[in-house]
Amino acid sequence: MRYLELRFPPPLVGITVAAVMWVTASLPPIWPPTSSVRLLAGVILLVIGIAIALSAVVSFRRAQTTVNPLNPETSTSLVSTGNFSRTRNPMYLGMLIGLLAWAVYLASALAFLGPVAFALYITRFQIVPEERAMHSLFGPAFFEYSQRVRRWL
């Protein structure tokens, strides 16, 4: 299944998962909180996810390296500061939290499978190939970084 590696931009994967979550939301809610409580919880999670992802983009820009997830071999520097000191994938973590926010708002049991599916897909078909590229480009520095900082959290 290597043909799926680095094939689809992660935001497209996230939007697709979000759409499937919306379709499955016709099932009864997991819990009965009012829509205003779900909305507030969803907005809080969404803001956190966006902040994490945007801070990662800013870190990449400052390091003058590519943010294009389909061509990790064009990276010019290994970013390990800011949120990258806590997670190796803050952009994907931000997207995952955004999908979790959507699942909270939808309050559907099946909707909560969306973030899980996203994490599994992105790990296998995006993160693992990116890590191979980073290891090839940065060798021992990336190995040390990957030993120190977790893939997700």
Image (cartoon, grey):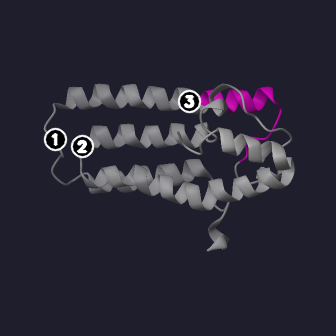
Figure quadrant of residue 82: top right
Q: CA distance from mark 1 to mark 3?
A: 28 Å
| Residue for badge 1 | 31
Residue type marked 3? Ile
Q: CA distance from mark 2 to mark 1?
A: 7 Å
Residue at image coords 22%, 27%: 37
Q: Earlier in the sequence, mark 2 or mark 3?
A: 3
For the residues labelled 2 and 3, say whether their Cβ atoms are less than 8 Å apart: no
Of tags 2 and 3, which is closer to the observer? Answer: 3
Vertically, is 49 above or below 15?
Answer: above
Q: Secondary structure at mark 3?
A: helix
Report whether residue 8 is seen.
Answer: no
Q: Earlier in the sequence, mark 2 or mark 1?
A: 1
Q: Main secondary structure of the magenta part?
A: helix
Q: Secondary structure at mark 1?
A: loop
Task: Report the span colored magenta.
Answer: 54-68
